[in-house]
Image (cartoon, rainbow, N blue to C red):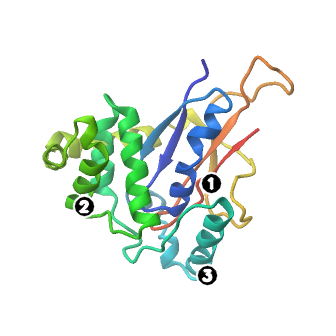
């Protein structure tokens, strides 16, 4: 069984939203699973010295045009949120609280939060909003709003967010640069593309799945391109 694809995303990124709508289906078509891993790109900025695209001349204006174009191309509901770039701390904390024992429920919640933010235009930054969406989405599965609210105040849950994504992101030996094309319709992407470790299978080898590539966002506040493709 091939290793799963690590899908790094920030709840503030519309490119992460678009990728979240398709990555599991595309991976399944090639016999791969996907491990979702929220990150806080604001923390990564402290290392890279970058700024959010919305705060950069030209890039910010281009992004607002680009996301609407992508939404139309793939038929995704999209509303430009007034709260952009949203603070994804609470959303990410709840995801990591769920994912070890309930990974599919964590994905379900991530999709619901993304939909609320980028399809409905809601501000998903406040903890109470995240708890409300989680309770509505997962209540029938035994995870209610009160449990989510309590988890958001748990010091262990807070520490998990500070350490887990950072450890994964810094594992440079597990990713490598790739010049792969992406699934985005725009050719002016700003993100760096990274692929899972290992070599692509030989052309025409039916015994191996195609080499899937996931792009890592490199900016916060509607930053670098998140995309997926097959080599």
Q: Residue 129, image x and y in percent?
A: 25, 61
Numbered disc in front, either 2 or 1: 2
What is the number of the mark on residue 129? 2
* Residue farthest along the right direction in this orientation: 204
- Please indicate whether residue 173 sits to the left or right of residue 125 in the image: right
- The tag earlier along the polypeptide, 2 or 3, is 3
Quadrant in the picture for residue 11: bottom left
Q: Residues within 10 Å of mark 2 (few under 14, many from 20)?
A: some
Residue drawn at x 48%, y 72% as measured from the top left = 79
- The tag earlier along the polypeptide, 3 or 1, is 3
Q: Residue 30, image x and y in percent?
A: 68, 30
Q: Closer to the camera, 84 or 177? A: 84
- What residue does disc 3 label? 58
Q: Residue 195, image x and y in percent?
A: 64, 39
Residue 96 vertical placement versus 64 (above, below): above
Instruction: Say what secondary structure mark 2 lies in.
Output: helix
What is the number of the mark on residue 48? none
Q: CA distance from mark 2 to mark 1?
A: 32 Å
Assess whether mark 3 and mark 2 are in contact (beta carbons under 8 angstroms). no
Q: Closer to the camera, 172 or 39? A: 39
């Amino acid at each position: 069984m091939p290793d799963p694809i690590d899908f790094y995303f920030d709840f503030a990124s519309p490119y992460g939203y678009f990728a979240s709508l398709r990555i599991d289906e595309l991976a399944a078509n090639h016999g791969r699973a996907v491990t979702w891993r929220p990150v806080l790109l604001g923390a990564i900025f402290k290392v890279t010295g970058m700024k959010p695209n919305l705060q950069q001349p030209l890039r910010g204006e281009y992004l607002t045009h680009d996301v609407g174009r992508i939404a139309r191309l793939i038929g995704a509901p999209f509303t430009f949120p007034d709260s952009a770039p949203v603070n994804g701390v609470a959303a990410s904390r709840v995801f990591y609280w769920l994912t070890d024992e309930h990974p599919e429920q964590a994905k379900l919640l991530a999709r619901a939060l993304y939909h609320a933010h980028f399809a409905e235009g809601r501000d998903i930054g406040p903890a109470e909003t995240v708890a409300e969406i989680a309770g509505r989405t997962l209540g029938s599965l035994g995870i209610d709003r009160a449990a989510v609210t309590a988890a958001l105040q748990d010091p262990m849950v807070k520490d998990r967010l500070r350490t887990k994504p950072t450890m994964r992101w810094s594992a440079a030996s597990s990713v490598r640069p790739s010049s792969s094309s992406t699934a985005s319709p725009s050719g002016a992407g700003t993100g760096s593309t990274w692929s899972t470790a290992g070599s692509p299978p030989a052309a025409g080898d039916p015994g191996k799945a195609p080499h899937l590539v996931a792009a890592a966002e490199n900016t916060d506040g509607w930053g670098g391109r998140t995309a997926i493709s097959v080599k």
